Amino acid sequence: MKEIRLHGRGGQGSVTAAEIIAVAAFEDKRFSQAFPAFGVERRGAPVMAFARIADKPIRVRSQIYEPDYVIVQDVTLLDVVDVAAGLKPTGKIIINTDRPREGLNLKTDAEVITIDATKIAMEILKRPIVNTTMLGAFCGASREVGLESLNKAISERFKGELGKKNLLAIKTAFERVS
Amino acid sequence: MSGKTANMKVVEGSYAVAHAVMCCRPDVISAYPITPQTHIVENLSQMVADGELNSKFLTVDSEFSALSVLVGVCAAGGRGYSSTTSQGLALMNEVLYNVSGMRLPIVMNVANRAIGAPLNIWNDQQDSIGARDVGWLQIYCEDVQEAVDATLQAYKIAEDKEIRMPAMVCMDGFVLTHVYEPVELLDKEKARDFLPDFQPDNILDPAHPKTFGAFADPSAFTEFRYQQFEAQQKSMAKIEKVAREFEEVFGRYYGGLLDGYYLDDAEIVIVSLGSVVGTIKDAVDAMRAEGKKVGLLKLRCYRPFPVQALRKALKEASVIAVIEKDVTIGCEAGLVTDLKASFYNSNIRTPIIGFAAGLGGRDITIKDIRNIVAKAEAARKGQQPEFEFLNLRTEIL
Protein backbone atom coordinates (compact mmCIF):
# COMPACT_ATOMS: atom_id res chain seq x y z
CA MET A 1 0.00 0.00 0.00
CA LYS A 2 1.19 3.49 -0.85
CA GLU A 3 0.13 6.40 1.32
CA ILE A 4 0.01 10.02 0.21
CA ARG A 5 -0.45 13.12 2.32
CA LEU A 6 -1.39 16.44 0.75
CA HIS A 7 -0.79 19.77 2.44
CA GLY A 8 -2.49 22.91 1.26
CA ARG A 9 -4.51 25.87 2.39
CA GLY A 10 -8.30 25.98 2.48
CA GLY A 11 -9.53 26.78 -1.03
CA GLN A 12 -6.54 25.31 -2.89
CA GLY A 13 -8.33 22.09 -3.79
CA SER A 14 -6.31 19.63 -1.70
CA VAL A 15 -9.33 17.46 -1.00
CA THR A 16 -10.24 17.46 -4.70
CA ALA A 17 -6.66 16.47 -5.55
CA ALA A 18 -6.82 13.52 -3.13
CA GLU A 19 -10.14 12.48 -4.65
CA ILE A 20 -8.66 12.61 -8.18
CA ILE A 21 -5.73 10.42 -7.08
CA ALA A 22 -8.28 7.87 -5.80
CA VAL A 23 -10.30 7.98 -9.02
CA ALA A 24 -7.16 7.68 -11.20
CA ALA A 25 -5.75 4.77 -9.17
CA PHE A 26 -9.05 2.93 -9.46
CA GLU A 27 -8.95 3.61 -13.19
CA ASP A 28 -5.58 1.79 -13.10
CA LYS A 29 -7.50 -1.22 -11.66
CA ARG A 30 -6.11 -0.68 -8.19
CA PHE A 31 -7.98 0.01 -4.95
CA SER A 32 -7.96 3.48 -3.46
CA GLN A 33 -9.25 5.68 -0.70
CA ALA A 34 -9.20 9.49 -0.26
CA PHE A 35 -10.35 11.58 2.66
CA PRO A 36 -9.80 14.99 4.20
CA ALA A 37 -8.21 15.66 7.58
CA PHE A 38 -11.53 16.52 9.07
CA GLY A 39 -11.37 20.00 10.46
CA VAL A 40 -13.21 23.26 10.56
CA GLU A 41 -11.74 24.39 7.27
CA ARG A 42 -11.56 28.05 6.36
CA ARG A 43 -10.16 29.63 3.24
CA GLY A 44 -6.42 30.10 3.74
CA ALA A 45 -6.06 27.91 6.82
CA PRO A 46 -3.61 24.97 6.64
CA VAL A 47 -5.46 21.80 5.60
CA MET A 48 -4.51 18.21 4.89
CA ALA A 49 -5.97 15.47 2.76
CA PHE A 50 -4.97 11.84 2.39
CA ALA A 51 -5.00 9.14 -0.25
CA ARG A 52 -4.15 5.45 -0.20
CA ILE A 53 -3.50 3.15 -3.17
CA ALA A 54 -3.28 -0.65 -2.86
CA ASP A 55 -3.73 -3.86 -4.80
CA LYS A 56 -6.44 -5.13 -2.45
CA PRO A 57 -9.43 -3.46 -0.75
CA ILE A 58 -8.35 -0.80 1.75
CA ARG A 59 -9.81 -1.23 5.23
CA VAL A 60 -7.66 0.95 7.49
CA ARG A 61 -9.35 4.27 8.40
CA SER A 62 -6.74 6.08 10.46
CA GLN A 63 -4.97 9.18 9.23
CA ILE A 64 -1.60 8.86 7.52
CA TYR A 65 1.44 9.35 9.74
CA GLU A 66 4.21 7.73 7.69
CA PRO A 67 3.46 8.66 4.09
CA ASP A 68 5.30 7.39 1.04
CA TYR A 69 4.62 10.70 -0.68
CA VAL A 70 3.92 14.23 0.48
CA ILE A 71 2.51 16.91 -1.80
CA VAL A 72 2.84 20.53 -0.65
CA GLN A 73 0.71 22.98 -2.60
CA ASP A 74 1.92 26.13 -0.85
CA VAL A 75 5.54 26.64 0.21
CA THR A 76 4.58 29.13 2.94
CA LEU A 77 3.19 26.15 4.86
CA LEU A 78 6.79 25.12 5.57
CA ASP A 79 6.93 27.91 8.16
CA VAL A 80 3.90 26.64 10.08
CA VAL A 81 3.53 22.90 9.43
CA ASP A 82 6.10 20.08 9.66
CA VAL A 83 5.15 18.86 6.20
CA ALA A 84 7.84 16.15 6.13
CA ALA A 85 6.76 14.64 9.46
CA GLY A 86 6.94 10.84 9.30
CA LEU A 87 7.80 10.80 5.58
CA LYS A 88 9.53 7.52 4.76
CA PRO A 89 13.27 7.95 3.90
CA THR A 90 12.54 6.06 0.69
CA GLY A 91 9.67 8.41 -0.10
CA LYS A 92 9.36 11.65 -2.01
CA ILE A 93 8.12 15.12 -1.17
CA ILE A 94 6.90 17.34 -3.99
CA ILE A 95 6.77 21.04 -3.21
CA ASN A 96 5.30 23.92 -5.16
CA THR A 97 7.96 26.60 -4.96
CA ASP A 98 10.20 28.82 -7.09
CA ARG A 99 12.93 28.57 -4.46
CA PRO A 100 15.88 26.16 -4.80
CA ARG A 101 15.39 22.99 -2.74
CA GLU A 102 18.64 23.56 -0.80
CA GLY A 103 17.19 26.57 0.97
CA LEU A 104 14.02 24.85 2.13
CA ASN A 105 15.68 23.27 5.18
CA LEU A 106 13.42 20.24 5.18
CA LYS A 107 14.02 17.72 7.92
CA THR A 108 13.86 14.60 5.78
CA ASP A 109 16.06 11.98 4.13
CA ALA A 110 13.46 11.53 1.40
CA GLU A 111 13.94 12.87 -2.12
CA VAL A 112 12.83 16.50 -2.41
CA ILE A 113 11.28 17.54 -5.71
CA THR A 114 10.44 21.16 -6.41
CA ILE A 115 8.26 22.56 -9.13
CA ASP A 116 7.00 26.09 -9.77
CA ALA A 117 3.40 24.96 -10.13
CA THR A 118 2.05 28.44 -9.48
CA LYS A 119 3.90 29.71 -12.58
CA ILE A 120 2.57 26.84 -14.71
CA ALA A 121 -0.97 27.36 -13.42
CA MET A 122 -0.83 31.12 -14.01
CA GLU A 123 0.41 30.61 -17.58
CA ILE A 124 -2.10 27.93 -18.51
CA LEU A 125 -5.12 28.32 -16.21
CA LYS A 126 -4.60 32.05 -15.59
CA ARG A 127 -5.35 31.36 -11.95
CA PRO A 128 -3.09 30.40 -9.02
CA ILE A 129 -4.97 27.10 -8.48
CA VAL A 130 -2.21 24.51 -8.49
CA ASN A 131 -3.88 21.26 -7.42
CA THR A 132 -4.09 19.69 -10.88
CA THR A 133 -0.59 20.88 -11.81
CA MET A 134 0.74 19.29 -8.62
CA LEU A 135 -1.04 16.06 -9.58
CA GLY A 136 0.90 16.08 -12.86
CA ALA A 137 4.10 16.46 -10.84
CA PHE A 138 3.05 13.69 -8.46
CA CYS A 139 2.29 11.40 -11.38
CA GLY A 140 5.65 12.13 -13.03
CA ALA A 141 7.67 11.78 -9.82
CA SER A 142 5.92 8.73 -8.38
CA ARG A 143 4.35 6.81 -11.28
CA GLU A 144 1.84 5.57 -8.70
CA VAL A 145 -0.98 6.52 -11.05
CA GLY A 146 -0.85 6.29 -14.82
CA LEU A 147 -0.87 9.55 -16.78
CA GLU A 148 -3.76 8.35 -18.93
CA SER A 149 -5.81 7.42 -15.90
CA LEU A 150 -5.04 10.76 -14.32
CA ASN A 151 -6.13 12.53 -17.50
CA LYS A 152 -9.34 10.55 -17.52
CA ALA A 153 -10.07 11.40 -13.90
CA ILE A 154 -9.41 15.08 -14.60
CA SER A 155 -11.64 15.06 -17.69
CA GLU A 156 -14.50 13.60 -15.66
CA ARG A 157 -14.09 16.30 -13.07
CA PHE A 158 -13.42 19.34 -15.31
CA LYS A 159 -15.36 19.55 -18.54
CA GLY A 160 -14.81 21.51 -21.76
CA GLU A 161 -12.17 24.21 -22.11
CA LEU A 162 -11.30 24.10 -18.40
CA GLY A 163 -10.71 20.36 -18.68
CA LYS A 164 -8.36 20.83 -21.64
CA LYS A 165 -6.36 23.51 -19.84
CA ASN A 166 -6.02 21.31 -16.77
CA LEU A 167 -4.77 18.46 -18.94
CA LEU A 168 -2.12 20.78 -20.41
CA ALA A 169 -1.08 21.91 -16.92
CA ILE A 170 -0.73 18.26 -15.89
CA LYS A 171 1.30 17.39 -18.96
CA THR A 172 3.63 20.34 -18.42
CA ALA A 173 4.27 19.43 -14.79
CA PHE A 174 4.57 15.73 -15.59
CA GLU A 175 7.27 16.38 -18.19
CA ARG A 176 9.13 18.81 -15.96
CA VAL A 177 9.67 16.29 -13.15
CA SER A 178 10.01 13.15 -15.31
CA MET B 1 -16.03 -4.56 1.13
CA SER B 2 -16.19 -7.73 -0.87
CA GLY B 3 -14.50 -8.42 -4.22
CA LYS B 4 -13.97 -5.83 -6.90
CA THR B 5 -16.61 -5.69 -9.61
CA ALA B 6 -16.91 -3.93 -12.93
CA ASN B 7 -19.72 -1.76 -11.61
CA MET B 8 -17.66 -0.19 -8.87
CA LYS B 9 -16.97 3.50 -8.92
CA VAL B 10 -15.00 5.88 -6.67
CA VAL B 11 -17.55 8.22 -5.10
CA GLU B 12 -18.01 10.08 -1.84
CA GLY B 13 -19.72 8.09 0.93
CA SER B 14 -22.51 10.64 1.26
CA TYR B 15 -23.29 10.47 -2.45
CA ALA B 16 -23.33 6.67 -2.39
CA VAL B 17 -25.79 6.66 0.51
CA ALA B 18 -27.98 9.33 -1.12
CA HIS B 19 -28.05 7.18 -4.25
CA ALA B 20 -29.14 4.20 -2.12
CA VAL B 21 -31.92 6.31 -0.61
CA MET B 22 -33.02 7.24 -4.13
CA CYS B 23 -33.25 3.53 -4.93
CA CYS B 24 -35.51 3.13 -1.88
CA ARG B 25 -37.98 5.65 -3.37
CA PRO B 26 -39.13 7.52 -0.24
CA ASP B 27 -42.34 9.52 -0.72
CA VAL B 28 -41.04 12.27 1.54
CA ILE B 29 -37.54 13.29 2.61
CA SER B 30 -37.57 15.65 5.55
CA ALA B 31 -34.29 16.86 6.96
CA TYR B 32 -32.34 19.68 8.52
CA PRO B 33 -28.72 20.03 7.41
CA ILE B 34 -26.03 19.44 10.03
CA THR B 35 -22.32 18.56 9.71
CA PRO B 36 -21.30 15.85 8.79
CA GLN B 37 -24.68 14.68 7.46
CA THR B 38 -25.00 17.66 5.07
CA HIS B 39 -23.69 16.06 1.89
CA ILE B 40 -26.27 13.25 2.12
CA VAL B 41 -29.25 15.60 2.10
CA GLU B 42 -27.62 18.02 -0.36
CA ASN B 43 -27.26 15.15 -2.82
CA LEU B 44 -30.87 14.07 -2.25
CA SER B 45 -32.09 17.61 -2.72
CA GLN B 46 -30.16 17.74 -6.00
CA MET B 47 -31.63 14.43 -7.17
CA VAL B 48 -35.15 15.71 -6.48
CA ALA B 49 -34.44 19.03 -8.22
CA ASP B 50 -33.00 17.21 -11.25
CA GLY B 51 -36.07 14.97 -11.48
CA GLU B 52 -33.99 11.84 -10.84
CA LEU B 53 -35.92 11.16 -7.66
CA ASN B 54 -39.68 11.58 -7.45
CA SER B 55 -39.91 12.48 -3.75
CA LYS B 56 -41.17 15.50 -1.88
CA PHE B 57 -38.12 17.14 -0.27
CA LEU B 58 -39.03 19.19 2.77
CA THR B 59 -36.64 21.60 4.42
CA VAL B 60 -37.81 22.24 7.94
CA ASP B 61 -36.90 24.51 10.86
CA SER B 62 -35.28 21.84 13.05
CA GLU B 63 -34.61 18.14 13.46
CA PHE B 64 -37.58 17.95 15.78
CA SER B 65 -39.78 19.08 12.88
CA ALA B 66 -37.90 16.90 10.38
CA LEU B 67 -38.93 13.73 12.16
CA SER B 68 -42.35 15.02 13.23
CA VAL B 69 -43.23 15.58 9.56
CA LEU B 70 -42.35 11.95 8.86
CA VAL B 71 -44.66 10.75 11.63
CA GLY B 72 -47.52 12.22 9.60
CA VAL B 73 -46.14 10.92 6.31
CA CYS B 74 -45.70 7.40 7.56
CA ALA B 75 -49.02 7.31 9.46
CA ALA B 76 -50.70 8.34 6.20
CA GLY B 77 -49.08 5.37 4.46
CA GLY B 78 -46.01 7.00 2.91
CA ARG B 79 -42.38 5.95 3.01
CA GLY B 80 -40.36 8.50 4.96
CA TYR B 81 -36.62 9.22 5.09
CA SER B 82 -34.46 11.50 7.16
CA SER B 83 -30.82 11.80 8.12
CA THR B 84 -29.17 13.54 11.02
CA THR B 85 -26.36 13.41 13.57
CA SER B 86 -25.24 14.51 17.02
CA GLN B 87 -27.23 17.46 18.43
CA GLY B 88 -29.79 16.92 15.68
CA LEU B 89 -30.47 13.38 16.86
CA ALA B 90 -30.64 14.66 20.44
CA LEU B 91 -33.21 17.25 19.40
CA MET B 92 -35.28 14.48 17.80
CA ASN B 93 -35.27 12.40 20.96
CA GLU B 94 -38.92 12.87 21.93
CA VAL B 95 -40.04 12.08 18.38
CA LEU B 96 -37.80 8.99 18.22
CA TYR B 97 -39.91 7.44 20.98
CA ASN B 98 -43.14 8.48 19.25
CA VAL B 99 -42.06 6.91 15.95
CA SER B 100 -41.25 3.54 17.52
CA GLY B 101 -44.27 3.68 19.82
CA MET B 102 -46.55 4.22 16.82
CA ARG B 103 -44.66 1.47 14.97
CA LEU B 104 -43.77 3.68 12.01
CA PRO B 105 -41.03 2.09 9.86
CA ILE B 106 -39.04 5.24 9.12
CA VAL B 107 -35.39 4.80 8.11
CA MET B 108 -32.74 7.31 8.98
CA ASN B 109 -29.01 7.47 8.29
CA VAL B 110 -27.13 8.73 11.33
CA ALA B 111 -23.77 10.28 10.38
CA ASN B 112 -22.26 9.54 13.78
CA ARG B 113 -20.73 12.54 15.54
CA ALA B 114 -19.84 13.58 19.08
CA ILE B 115 -22.39 15.51 21.15
CA GLY B 116 -21.49 18.78 22.89
CA ALA B 117 -20.63 20.39 25.19
CA PRO B 118 -17.86 21.10 24.43
CA LEU B 119 -18.84 21.65 20.81
CA ASN B 120 -17.21 19.05 18.58
CA ILE B 121 -18.10 18.25 14.98
CA TRP B 122 -15.95 15.13 14.70
CA ASN B 123 -16.86 11.47 14.73
CA ASP B 124 -17.77 9.30 17.63
CA GLN B 125 -20.93 7.27 18.33
CA GLN B 126 -22.23 8.94 21.47
CA ASP B 127 -25.28 10.19 19.54
CA SER B 128 -26.81 6.88 18.43
CA ILE B 129 -25.52 4.74 21.30
CA GLY B 130 -27.12 7.37 23.56
CA ALA B 131 -30.38 6.64 21.73
CA ARG B 132 -30.22 2.89 22.30
CA ASP B 133 -33.41 2.75 24.39
CA VAL B 134 -35.79 4.57 22.02
CA GLY B 135 -36.99 1.47 20.18
CA TRP B 136 -35.26 2.00 16.82
CA LEU B 137 -33.25 -0.80 15.25
CA GLN B 138 -29.60 0.19 14.91
CA ILE B 139 -27.23 -1.15 12.26
CA TYR B 140 -23.57 -0.04 12.25
CA CYS B 141 -21.50 0.05 9.05
CA GLU B 142 -17.84 -0.74 8.48
CA ASP B 143 -17.46 0.95 5.09
CA VAL B 144 -19.41 2.90 2.49
CA GLN B 145 -20.60 -0.20 0.66
CA GLU B 146 -22.15 -1.51 3.85
CA ALA B 147 -23.86 1.82 4.50
CA VAL B 148 -25.35 1.70 0.98
CA ASP B 149 -26.50 -1.89 1.33
CA ALA B 150 -27.76 -1.53 4.91
CA THR B 151 -29.94 1.43 3.89
CA LEU B 152 -31.88 -0.72 1.42
CA GLN B 153 -31.97 -3.66 3.84
CA ALA B 154 -33.21 -1.42 6.66
CA TYR B 155 -36.43 -0.48 4.83
CA LYS B 156 -37.16 -4.13 4.09
CA ILE B 157 -36.65 -5.10 7.73
CA ALA B 158 -38.47 -2.08 9.18
CA GLU B 159 -41.52 -2.35 6.91
CA ASP B 160 -41.98 -6.09 7.42
CA LYS B 161 -45.49 -6.81 8.73
CA GLU B 162 -44.06 -8.74 11.69
CA ILE B 163 -41.68 -5.96 12.66
CA ARG B 164 -42.98 -2.46 11.81
CA MET B 165 -40.19 -0.68 13.65
CA PRO B 166 -38.04 2.28 12.63
CA ALA B 167 -34.34 1.81 11.88
CA MET B 168 -31.16 3.85 12.11
CA VAL B 169 -28.33 3.03 9.72
CA CYS B 170 -25.28 4.38 11.51
CA MET B 171 -22.17 5.42 9.56
CA ASP B 172 -19.22 7.22 11.09
CA GLY B 173 -19.36 10.93 10.33
CA PHE B 174 -16.53 12.23 8.07
CA VAL B 175 -14.76 8.84 8.20
CA LEU B 176 -17.44 7.32 5.97
CA THR B 177 -19.56 10.30 4.89
CA HIS B 178 -16.60 12.19 3.41
CA VAL B 179 -14.38 9.36 2.17
CA TYR B 180 -13.96 8.61 -1.54
CA GLU B 181 -13.63 4.89 -2.15
CA PRO B 182 -14.77 2.27 -4.65
CA VAL B 183 -18.44 1.43 -4.22
CA GLU B 184 -20.96 -0.49 -6.24
CA LEU B 185 -24.01 1.76 -6.40
CA LEU B 186 -27.35 -0.03 -6.19
CA ASP B 187 -29.14 -0.99 -9.37
CA LYS B 188 -32.50 0.80 -9.35
CA GLU B 189 -34.51 -2.06 -10.83
CA LYS B 190 -32.98 -4.71 -8.60
CA ALA B 191 -33.62 -2.46 -5.60
CA ARG B 192 -37.26 -2.07 -6.65
CA ASP B 193 -37.69 -5.85 -6.81
CA PHE B 194 -35.94 -6.28 -3.48
CA LEU B 195 -37.94 -3.53 -1.78
CA PRO B 196 -41.51 -3.28 -3.13
CA ASP B 197 -43.69 -0.29 -2.26
CA PHE B 198 -44.62 0.16 1.39
CA GLN B 199 -47.78 -1.80 2.27
CA PRO B 200 -49.09 -0.43 5.57
CA ASP B 201 -51.86 -2.22 7.48
CA ASN B 202 -53.22 0.83 9.22
CA ILE B 203 -53.19 4.35 7.85
CA LEU B 204 -54.77 7.67 8.66
CA ASP B 205 -57.78 7.79 6.39
CA PRO B 206 -60.75 10.17 6.87
CA ALA B 207 -63.11 7.48 5.51
CA HIS B 208 -61.99 5.05 8.22
CA PRO B 209 -60.93 7.21 11.19
CA LYS B 210 -58.16 5.85 13.44
CA THR B 211 -55.91 7.31 16.11
CA PHE B 212 -52.15 6.74 16.38
CA GLY B 213 -50.31 6.97 19.67
CA ALA B 214 -52.91 9.11 21.39
CA PHE B 215 -53.43 7.54 24.79
CA ALA B 216 -52.90 4.34 26.77
CA ASP B 217 -53.72 4.25 30.45
CA PRO B 218 -52.07 1.91 33.00
CA SER B 219 -54.34 -0.93 31.95
CA ALA B 220 -52.77 -1.07 28.45
CA PHE B 221 -49.44 0.81 28.39
CA THR B 222 -47.31 -2.17 29.45
CA GLU B 223 -48.72 -4.17 26.55
CA PHE B 224 -47.72 -1.49 24.05
CA ARG B 225 -44.16 -1.57 25.41
CA TYR B 226 -44.17 -5.38 25.40
CA GLN B 227 -45.15 -5.46 21.74
CA GLN B 228 -42.33 -3.04 20.83
CA PHE B 229 -39.95 -5.22 22.80
CA GLU B 230 -41.19 -8.35 21.05
CA ALA B 231 -40.93 -6.72 17.63
CA GLN B 232 -37.27 -5.95 18.33
CA GLN B 233 -36.68 -9.56 19.40
CA LYS B 234 -38.39 -10.86 16.25
CA SER B 235 -36.41 -8.51 14.04
CA MET B 236 -33.21 -10.51 14.75
CA ALA B 237 -34.34 -13.39 12.56
CA LYS B 238 -35.55 -10.90 9.95
CA ILE B 239 -32.21 -9.05 9.90
CA GLU B 240 -30.43 -12.35 9.21
CA LYS B 241 -32.97 -13.32 6.56
CA VAL B 242 -32.82 -9.99 4.76
CA ALA B 243 -28.99 -10.06 4.78
CA ARG B 244 -29.16 -13.46 3.03
CA GLU B 245 -31.84 -12.32 0.58
CA PHE B 246 -29.68 -9.32 -0.21
CA GLU B 247 -26.74 -11.63 -0.85
CA GLU B 248 -28.79 -13.64 -3.33
CA VAL B 249 -29.69 -10.55 -5.34
CA PHE B 250 -26.60 -8.35 -4.94
CA GLY B 251 -23.89 -10.88 -4.02
CA ARG B 252 -22.70 -9.15 -0.86
CA TYR B 253 -22.97 -10.35 2.73
CA TYR B 254 -21.32 -8.99 5.88
CA GLY B 255 -23.07 -11.03 8.52
CA GLY B 256 -26.59 -10.37 9.73
CA LEU B 257 -26.41 -9.48 13.41
CA LEU B 258 -22.66 -9.86 13.69
CA ASP B 259 -19.65 -11.10 11.80
CA GLY B 260 -16.45 -12.82 12.86
CA TYR B 261 -12.90 -12.29 11.66
CA TYR B 262 -10.37 -14.96 12.67
CA LEU B 263 -12.77 -15.80 15.47
CA ASP B 264 -12.68 -19.61 15.42
CA ASP B 265 -9.41 -20.19 17.29
CA ALA B 266 -9.01 -16.70 18.75
CA GLU B 267 -7.94 -16.39 22.37
CA ILE B 268 -8.01 -12.60 22.49
CA VAL B 269 -11.17 -11.25 20.89
CA ILE B 270 -11.82 -7.61 20.13
CA VAL B 271 -15.49 -6.64 19.95
CA SER B 272 -16.29 -3.42 18.12
CA LEU B 273 -18.62 -1.71 15.68
CA GLY B 274 -18.54 0.90 12.91
CA SER B 275 -15.69 2.00 10.68
CA VAL B 276 -12.90 1.25 13.17
CA VAL B 277 -13.56 -2.41 12.38
CA GLY B 278 -11.54 -1.96 9.15
CA THR B 279 -8.51 -0.70 11.06
CA ILE B 280 -8.89 -3.54 13.56
CA LYS B 281 -8.92 -6.11 10.72
CA ASP B 282 -5.57 -4.81 9.45
CA ALA B 283 -4.20 -4.94 13.00
CA VAL B 284 -5.48 -8.52 13.42
CA ASP B 285 -3.74 -9.53 10.17
CA ALA B 286 -0.45 -8.06 11.40
CA MET B 287 -0.70 -9.79 14.78
CA ARG B 288 -1.76 -13.11 13.25
CA ALA B 289 1.35 -12.96 11.07
CA GLU B 290 3.32 -12.80 14.34
CA GLY B 291 1.49 -15.88 15.64
CA LYS B 292 -0.83 -14.09 18.08
CA LYS B 293 -4.26 -15.69 18.34
CA VAL B 294 -6.26 -12.49 17.99
CA GLY B 295 -9.74 -12.27 16.46
CA LEU B 296 -12.49 -9.76 15.92
CA LEU B 297 -16.21 -9.81 16.46
CA LYS B 298 -17.85 -7.07 14.46
CA LEU B 299 -21.22 -6.15 15.84
CA ARG B 300 -23.46 -5.06 13.01
CA CYS B 301 -26.71 -4.85 14.91
CA TYR B 302 -26.64 -3.08 18.28
CA ARG B 303 -30.42 -2.82 18.67
CA PRO B 304 -31.81 -5.38 19.03
CA PHE B 305 -28.82 -6.59 21.04
CA PRO B 306 -28.12 -10.15 19.83
CA VAL B 307 -27.53 -11.79 23.20
CA GLN B 308 -27.70 -15.43 22.05
CA ALA B 309 -25.57 -14.88 18.95
CA LEU B 310 -22.93 -13.07 21.04
CA ARG B 311 -22.83 -15.84 23.65
CA LYS B 312 -22.38 -18.41 20.91
CA ALA B 313 -19.70 -16.49 19.02
CA LEU B 314 -17.66 -15.52 22.09
CA LYS B 315 -17.85 -18.62 24.27
CA GLU B 316 -14.35 -19.87 23.38
CA ALA B 317 -12.52 -16.58 23.93
CA SER B 318 -10.17 -16.34 26.88
CA VAL B 319 -10.33 -12.54 27.11
CA ILE B 320 -12.51 -9.92 25.40
CA ALA B 321 -11.63 -6.28 24.72
CA VAL B 322 -14.48 -3.98 23.68
CA ILE B 323 -13.59 -0.87 21.67
CA GLU B 324 -16.34 1.70 21.34
CA LYS B 325 -16.66 5.39 20.53
CA ASP B 326 -19.02 6.35 23.32
CA VAL B 327 -19.14 6.56 27.08
CA THR B 328 -22.04 6.15 29.47
CA ILE B 329 -21.15 9.02 31.76
CA GLY B 330 -21.61 7.35 35.11
CA CYS B 331 -21.16 3.67 34.13
CA GLU B 332 -18.53 2.58 31.60
CA ALA B 333 -19.95 2.55 28.05
CA GLY B 334 -22.89 1.15 26.10
CA LEU B 335 -21.54 -1.91 24.33
CA VAL B 336 -19.31 -3.17 27.14
CA THR B 337 -22.06 -2.98 29.78
CA ASP B 338 -24.56 -4.67 27.45
CA LEU B 339 -22.07 -7.43 26.68
CA LYS B 340 -21.30 -8.06 30.34
CA ALA B 341 -25.03 -8.15 31.13
CA SER B 342 -25.68 -10.64 28.34
CA PHE B 343 -23.07 -13.05 29.77
CA TYR B 344 -24.08 -12.89 33.43
CA ASN B 345 -26.77 -15.57 33.31
CA SER B 346 -24.74 -17.82 31.05
CA ASN B 347 -21.79 -20.02 31.96
CA ILE B 348 -19.35 -17.68 30.21
CA ARG B 349 -16.95 -16.16 32.69
CA THR B 350 -14.50 -14.61 30.27
CA PRO B 351 -12.88 -11.40 31.50
CA ILE B 352 -14.18 -8.38 29.58
CA ILE B 353 -12.38 -5.05 29.45
CA GLY B 354 -13.75 -1.91 27.86
CA PHE B 355 -12.19 1.03 26.05
CA ALA B 356 -13.76 4.37 25.23
CA ALA B 357 -11.75 5.28 22.14
CA GLY B 358 -11.92 7.76 19.31
CA LEU B 359 -14.06 10.20 21.24
CA GLY B 360 -14.69 13.51 19.48
CA GLY B 361 -12.71 12.40 16.43
CA ARG B 362 -9.48 11.24 18.10
CA ASP B 363 -7.79 8.97 15.59
CA ILE B 364 -7.56 5.22 16.29
CA THR B 365 -4.47 3.65 14.72
CA ILE B 366 -3.22 0.11 14.22
CA LYS B 367 -0.70 0.83 16.99
CA ASP B 368 -3.60 1.65 19.32
CA ILE B 369 -5.21 -1.70 18.54
CA ARG B 370 -1.92 -3.46 19.32
CA ASN B 371 -1.80 -1.61 22.66
CA ILE B 372 -5.32 -2.74 23.44
CA VAL B 373 -4.39 -6.35 22.69
CA ALA B 374 -1.39 -6.03 25.03
CA LYS B 375 -3.74 -4.71 27.72
CA ALA B 376 -6.11 -7.62 27.06
CA GLU B 377 -3.20 -10.01 27.65
CA ALA B 378 -2.52 -8.23 30.96
CA ALA B 379 -6.22 -8.51 31.83
CA ARG B 380 -5.93 -12.30 31.72
CA LYS B 381 -3.59 -11.96 34.69
CA GLY B 382 -5.90 -9.46 36.38
CA GLN B 383 -3.52 -6.59 35.66
CA GLN B 384 -5.77 -4.25 33.73
CA PRO B 385 -8.61 -1.97 34.88
CA GLU B 386 -12.07 -3.02 33.71
CA PHE B 387 -12.64 0.20 31.83
CA GLU B 388 -10.30 2.78 30.36
CA PHE B 389 -10.32 5.96 28.30
CA LEU B 390 -7.83 5.08 25.56
CA ASN B 391 -4.90 7.48 25.12
CA LEU B 392 -6.05 9.77 27.90
CA ARG B 393 -3.83 12.86 27.89
CA THR B 394 -3.22 13.15 31.61
CA GLU B 395 -0.95 16.16 31.04
CA ILE B 396 -3.92 18.39 30.19
CA LEU B 397 -6.26 17.21 32.91
Image (cartoon, coloured by chain):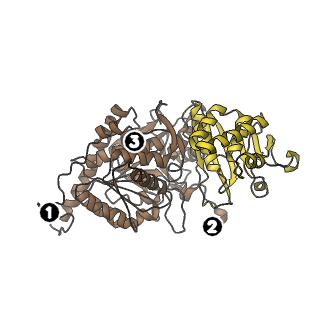
Chain the render paints brown: B
Residue B216, percent across and down? 18, 67
The reply to whether the C-beta atoms of the residues labelled 2 and 3 are less than 8 Å apart is no
Q: Reading the chain from its start, which is encountered first: label 1 or label 3?
A: 3
Instruction: Tell me: A3 left or right of B379.
Output: right
In the rendered image, residues at marks 2 and 1 fall on the same chain: yes
Task: Quickly name the residue at label 1.
Answer: B206
Number of numbered callouts drawn? 3
Alpha carbons under labels 1 and 3: distance apart? 37 Å
Alpha carbons under labels 2 and 1: distance apart? 61 Å
In the rendered image, residues at marks 1 and 3 fall on the same chain: yes
The reply to whether the C-beta atoms of the residues labelled 2 and 1 are less than 8 Å apart is no
Residue A166, percent across and down? 66, 42
Give, as a three-letter code, the residue at label 1: Pro
Chain name for mark 1: B
Give, as a three-letter code, the residue at label 3: Asp
Crowd band around label 3 with a 10 angstrom C-alpha radius: few (<14), some (14–19), many (20+): many
Residue B172, percent across and down? 49, 51
Numbered mark located on residue B149 in the image: 3
Q: Reading the chain from its start, which is encountered first: label 2 or label 3?
A: 3
Q: Reading the chain from its start, which is encountered first: label 2 or label 1?
A: 1
Give, as a three-letter code, the residue at label 2: Leu
Q: Residue at x 48, y 30 (%)?
A: B6
Q: Residue at x 70, y 39 (%)?
A: A168
Numbered mark located on residue B397 in the image: 2
Q: Secondary structure at mark 1?
A: loop
Chain name for mark 3: B
Foreground tag (2 vs 3): 3
Crowd band around label 2 with a 10 angstrom C-alpha radius: few (<14), some (14–19), many (20+): few
Q: Is residue B347 visible?
A: no
Chain the render paints yellow: A
Q: Quadrant of the C terminus of chain B?
A: bottom right
